[in-house]
Amino acid sequence: MAKIWRPSKYLNHAPEEWRKIIDNYLEWCVDTEEALTDQFWNVKSYITRVNIPSVEGFCWLIKIDKNSFYDWTRKHEIFLYALREIKSQQAQRLLNKGLWWQYNTWVVTRMLAANHWYADKQETKVDQTTKTIPASESELDEALTKLQEEKAKYS
């Protein structure tokens, strides 16, 4: 029995139109400051509402599934451009604002590790020595006496 596939939701816009949509999305992704007020509308403090460019956000804007977007990046060059622009602007903002403590550093490190292959690395040195095990019984006896002698030195 043949499989029946649902038609793609790909909107056949010209590349210039897609580029305009992508650029508008990236311009829309701006952090905003909001005032926190008490019950009398007196400003107590300000919070930053973060709006980082993401593939999920762009997919929400054009009303498609994330998997469809990744399929389209393989078929249509303009979506590959969109993916590169979103990822590069996302990484740039995470690095810059993370270094200036404007974003939570824990969140920044997790996002950079998950989306941009950055990683916390710790250098570890492993000292590993190998010893060959003798095959014959006499060699085993010699090795055992050597080990017992070494043990006696340190006891």
Image (cartoon, rainbow, N blue to C red):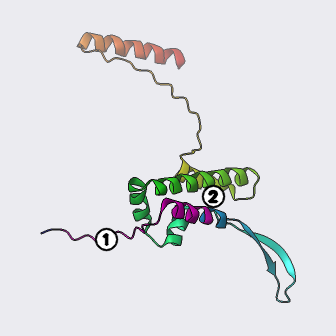
Q: Specify whether residue 19 is painted magenta.
A: yes
Write down the residue under mark 1.
7
The N terminus: image quadrant: bottom left
Q: Specify whether residue 22 is painted magenta.
A: yes
Q: Hey, what amino acid is under mark 2?
A: Val
Q: Which residues are magenta?
A: 3-24
Judge by depth and name the residue closer to the eye, 40 or 10.
10
Is 37 left, or right, of 128 in this rendering? right
Write down the residue under mark 2.
107
Percent position (x, y) of residue 57? 55, 67
**Residue, x 35% and y 16% (percent of image)?**
144
**Residue, x 42% and y 67% (percent of image)?**
12
56, above or below 118, in the image: below
Q: Hey, what amino acid is under mark 1?
A: Pro
Distance of label 1 from label 2 (alpha carbons): 38 Å
Judge by depth and name the residue closer to the eye, 77 or 141.
77
**Residue, x 73% and y 50% (percent of image)?**
99
User: What kind of element bears circle 1?
Assistant: loop
User: What kind of element bears circle 2?
Assistant: helix
